[in-house]
Amino acid sequence: MADLKLSGIQKSYSGQVEVLKDINLDIKQGELVVFVGPSGCGKSTLLRMIAGLEKISGGTLEIDGMVVNDMPPAQRGIAMVFQSYALYPHMTVRDNMSFALKLAKKSNAEIDAAVNKAAEILQLGPYLDRLPKALSGGQRQRVAIGRAIVRDPKVYLFDEPLSNLDAALRVATRIEIARLKESMPDSTMIYVTHDQVEAMTLATRIVVLANKGIAQVGTPLELYETPQNEFVAQFIGSPAMNLLSGEIVTTGEQTKIKLDCGGTAFASIATTTDDMGAKVNIGVRPEDFLRTDGDDWFFKGKVDITEALGEVTLLYFDPISDAGPVVAKLPGINQNLRGQAVGFTVDPSKVHLFKNGLSMR
């Protein structure tokens, strides 16, 4: 198993189209690091550069202290699980999993031991003599993962491995991957996804990519509770964090803020007199709104649309200027609120302030 170090990594095509720039990241042995970001941000490209499938335009990539920029993929000690299963349809599960070991001239005893161990970890024992067409989508993806495990690589790379599965299979296979990581605590894994649930539940750390670089790196809870900028604040969490324009009207350890649309509240964020009157964006997650029927509301609006999800109801309010609709999440079923004016307060510790796009925490 291995550490990885990315220093000043850049990627451009034809020397003109820049995809990634100045990527600096240390990944320690045993971590499961997840790359997330909007479509086209370069997360799969970065993964393919680590695998050796894309040429690095600038910077250095080290695996276990060795620079591998020009090292062929087969010599990097990396196994990659792709979005598509890419199984040989005419081979059994056993043959699919053992194919790379046979090419490497491993003995039959070594091959059998590796395949049986991987099959036990992934609960594939009963399916070893089946062809891929006799398996479900989730089972096929587990075979693809097993094909990586038998190689005993230094680093595992997963490129959106669950995106081809339906919702139920995604959940089941995500749990399998979590169990796999627990059974291999020293394994280093890098996982690309656009699914926030996968990122939040699987990751040791999340790397949020945006604007050709890294927007923030941290544990799932760090990104959720203390986003460093507006992009991460709205990218992590579903529905996205509400951003409302306002200004600072009182400074100190507990700063008072006033919304442009009328309400006031406190934020547990220390500010100085230099911040007095500063225009800020005030971030509140939908689940952090607290309903009130009194006059002490922070935000009040007319409910435009309701979405009852069973355990919670999402309330969408009429857009305020160009900020888009405000969303609140209430427990239970509250469909009867459509068309009504509803007010909310907010816990000061749950308020985020952003000045010039950056967090004031």
Image (cartoon, rainbow, N blue to C red):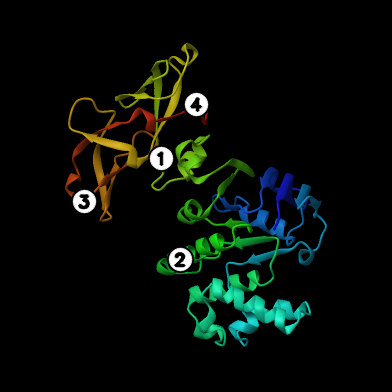
Q: Earlier in the sequence, mark 2 or mark 1?
A: 2
- Residue 30 visible? The answer is yes
Disc 2, disc 4: CB below 8 Å? Answer: no
Q: Secondary structure at mark 2?
A: helix
Q: Gap in Å between the C-alphas at discs 2 and 3?
A: 27 Å
| Amino acid marked by disc 4 | Met
Residue on which the image places disc 4: 360
Q: Secondary structure at mark 1?
A: loop
Q: Earlier in the sequence, mark 2 or mark 4?
A: 2
Q: In percent of the image, x 59 and y 82: which residue is there? A: 93
Residue on which the image places disc 2: 170
Q: In percent of the image, x 46 and y 11: which residue is there? A: 273
| Amino acid marked by disc 3 | Ile
Q: Secondary structure at mark 4?
A: loop
Disc 2, disc 1: CB below 8 Å? Answer: no
Q: Secondary structure at mark 3?
A: loop
Name the spot of residue 293 as percent of width and height, x first.
Answer: 17, 32
Name the spot of residue 161 as percent of width and height, x first.
Answer: 55, 65
Residue 233 in the figure: left or right of residue 57 = left
| Callout in the foreground (2, 1) | 2
- Residue 259 visible? The answer is no
Disc 4, disc 3: CB below 8 Å? Answer: no
Query: Local crowd at mark 3 within 10 Å, few (<14), some, or many (≥20)?
Result: some
Q: Earlier in the sequence, mark 1 or mark 3?
A: 1
Q: In percent of the image, x 76 and y 61: which residue is there? A: 76
Disc 1, disc 3: CB below 8 Å? Answer: no
Give residue 333's mark: 3
Q: Residue furthest right?
A: 70
Residue on which the image places disc 1: 241
